[in-house]
Amino acid sequence: MTTPPPEQARAAIIDVDGTLVDSNYFHTVAWWEAFRQAGHKVATRDIHRLIGMSGGNLIERLIGPGHSEEHVSAISDAHATLFATWHDRLRPVPGAADLLRALARRGWRVVLASSARGDDLVALRRAIDADDAILAATDSDQVDSGKPAPDLVEAALEEARVPPGRAHFVGDSVWDVISAARVGVPCTALLSGGVGADELKEAGAAAVYDTPADLLAHLDTSPLAG
């Protein structure tokens, strides 16, 4: 693993759900059931479009503001319980581990920036199976506001000890692109989370690839070249 001098250090900040692990549709179903249990009828297509956003923001977008903290917490906790039933069946998106290791070999400080809770992130990292390439990880338990707020990206920059101009984000949702842009970090987007290329480009993605394997195959001509 290459170790560049501090002034040349750069960080690859990478989302997890949908980007490195094929989990977005499991989240969608878990949210759907959590809303159903709480008495809300929410379409799965509306949920899927918000995956990648923090749980609190997702709930408010889908059922509106004004609900008690207890009601919102009940929905969030139900989602966590339901999603946890998938932990042992989570699988990486093709090329996930290989991409992380390739970036680490090229001297990138690889930091995960996930909206997941701690227990979920443990399961997601186990599915990726590339901890040897990961410098650090930030999750929703460490910040006040999740995506599309910039807090997770800012926390990842602190973990990597690099300025925004020495970082690049890789994600799969418009919320990834937006949160990175709010800190001045460009974002390369993947289609593995189920969001269309046009939406990602419109949000400001620097480039769009199919999967981590596709990005790895084109790494030398991508925004992460070098």
Image (cartoon, rainbow, N blue to C red):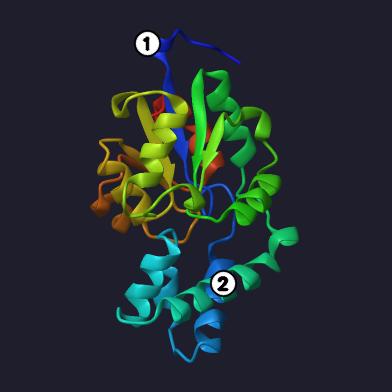
- Residue 7 marker: 1
Question: Mark 1: few, some, or many residues within 10 Å (few <14, many ≥20)?
Answer: few
Left or right for 98, reference 170? right
- Residue 77 marker: 2
Disc 1 is placed on an element classified as helix
Relative to 56, residue 190 above or below: above
Left or right for 182, reference 20? left
Taking the spot 38% from the left edge, 32% from the top edge, the residue there is 168
Left or right for 184, reference 76? left
Mark yes or no: residue 4 visible. Answer: yes
Relative to 67, residue 73 above or below: above
The location of residue 45, given as percent across then percent down, is: 43, 76
Front residue of this view, candidates 203 and 115: 115
Residue type at tag 1: Glu
Q: Which part of the image, by quadrant, shows the C terminus?
A: top left
The location of residue 193, given as percent across then percent down, is: 48, 57
Question: Mark 2: few, some, or many residues within 10 Å (few <14, many ≥20)?
Answer: some
